[in-house]
Amino acid sequence: MENNYYYSQKEKDDTITFNSSSSPIAVTQYAYRTGINNFRDFFSTTEYFDGDTPLTFLIANYVHDMNLLVNLIKKFDTRNEFKELINIPNDYGETPLHVAAIYNNVEVTKAIIESKYIDPTIKDHRCLTAMDIAILMGHTKVSNVLKDCKNMPISDIKPNIYQWGNIFTSKLSFEVRSNQTPLLFNDTLSSPIQTSYGQNFCLTLTDTGHVYSAGLCSYGKTGQNKKRDILIPTMIVSLGDKRIKAIACGKDHSLLLDDIGCVYSFGNSSMGRLGLDYTDLAEPPIFISKPTLISSFGDKCMTTIACGTDSSFSISSDGHVYSWGSNINSKLGFQGAILQSTPRKIENLVKMKDVACSNWHTVLLDEKGYVYTFGSNIDGRLGRSINGKESYQAGIVNLDFKVRKIHCGTNFTTVLTESNTLYSWGSNNHGQLGVPSISAVSEFSEKPLL
C-alpha cells in the first residue's frame, strides 16, 4: 500500500484509487511516473474518478492551495502532446472550464482561459457552455472573466422548471425560497414531463425517456457515478439507451420504470427498499449509486411505481400489487415481517391501477375508481375506521364518487374525482387538507372533506 501521494495502488491488479484528499501533486506525480504517452492517456480517462477526468475531479474537489491546481493547468500548455487535455470532457460532457464555472472558481477559470488551446464554445450534455452556466447560476465574477474569451457564445435559455421551499443552491447550501426559483434545465432535444423530489435531491424525466438528477450525492441517491453533489440537473448516462417512462423518489432512494415494464432502483438499501435482496439489520446499509434492475420480477411487466419514505410499490400489467422495504405500521399490506427485501405480491386484492404511499400509510386505486387504504391510521390518514392504530388489510374508503387520481402527503391523503373535485383526509395540523381549522377537524379528519 503506497499512500504518501494520497492514492493507493493494489499490487495484484494494479488498480489506482484516489479520494477527495488527493492533491494536484499526487495526481501529477502518479501521471508522470507512467510516462509522457500514459500521462496524456491518464488525464483523458474517467476510469479512476467515477466519471470525472483527473482535472475535472480536482477542480470539483480540491479546495486547498489553488496555486497547485493552477500550475497543473499551465503544464498542459508546455507540450504539444498535451494541448487537447484542457478541453477533455468528463462523462457528463463537462470540460474543466464547465466545472470551474459550476463551482464558481475564479482563479481556475482565469488559468484555463489563458491556455492557447482552450475552446470556450464547447457545450456539455445539457447543451450549456461555461458562460451559460456562470450566468444562470449567478456566478458574476466567473462570467466577467469569461467575457475575455473570444467568440464566447451565450445561449438563449428559458427555464421551464421552477422550485421553491428549502432548495439546494449554487452556493452548495440550502436556502428557503418562497418565490418560484428556476431550475437550470436545458435539454434542447426534449421537454420535461415529470419531476419527483426526495430528501435533498430531485429527478426529472423528459419526453424522450431520459432522466436527470440533482442534489446531494449521499447514499448514491442521485444515481450518478460521480461522488459529488450535483448543482445542475445532470443526465444519468449509465441508463444508456433505456427509455424511462416513470420516476418515483423516496427519502433516500428512487425507482425508475422503463417502456418495456422493467423496474430499476438506486440509493439507500436500508430496510430492503431497493428490492435487491439486501438485508442490513445487523450491517451498515449498502448504497447503490447506479440504477440497477430488480431482477426478481422476471418476465412480469410493471406499469406503475411509487415510493414511500422507506418503502416501494409497483403494479403489474395484470393489476397485481407488489411491495417491499420497511413494513413498519403494516404499510406494505401484509403482517409479520418488519421488512421485505424483494418485491412481494399483496394477496387478496382486486385489480389495481394506481398506488400512492407515504411514511406510514398506503393508498390504492382499483380499475373501477374505488379507493383502498392500509397502514397507520394515526390522525385518520386511512380515511376509514379500523380497530386499533394500524391495519395491514386493504380496506375500501366509503366514498360517494369515483376517483381517478390519488396522492399521499406525509400524514394525509388527497383524491381527485372523475368530476375533477378534490377531497382530502388525515392530519390538518398545518392546514394541509385545504380546509379551515374548524373545531371538528382542527387536528385531523378521518372522513373525506371537500
Image (cartoon, grey):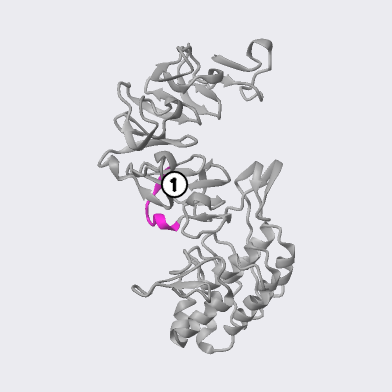
Figure check: 375 above or below 302: above
Figure check: 311 above or below 15: above
Task: Say left or right for 212 vs 170.
Answer: left
Label 1 sits on residue? 285
At 54% from the left edge and 17% from the top edge, which residue is drawn?
380
Figure check: 5 above or below 197: below
Residue 403 visible from this viewpoint: yes
Q: Where's residue 426, x and y in %?
A: 56, 20
Q: Residue furthest bottom?
A: 79
At 52% from the left edge and 81% from the top edge, which residue is drawn?
29
Q: Quadrant of residue 370?
A: top left
Residue nearest the viewer, comparing 222 with 350: 222
Q: Quadrant of the C terminus?
A: top right
Q: Quadrant of residue 113?
A: bottom right
At 32% from the left edge and 33% from the top edge, which residue is drawn?
344
Task: Say left or right for 105 vs 413.
Answer: right
Residue 449 visible from this viewpoint: no
Crowding near the residue tagged with mark 1, few <14, some 14–19, many ≥20 C-alpha atoms within 10 Å: some
How many labels sit on residues? 1
Residue nearest the viewer, comparing 312 with 204: 312
Task: Say left or right for 41 vs 65.
Answer: left
Q: Which residues are magenta?
A: 237-246
Q: Where's residue 372, x and y in %?
A: 42, 20
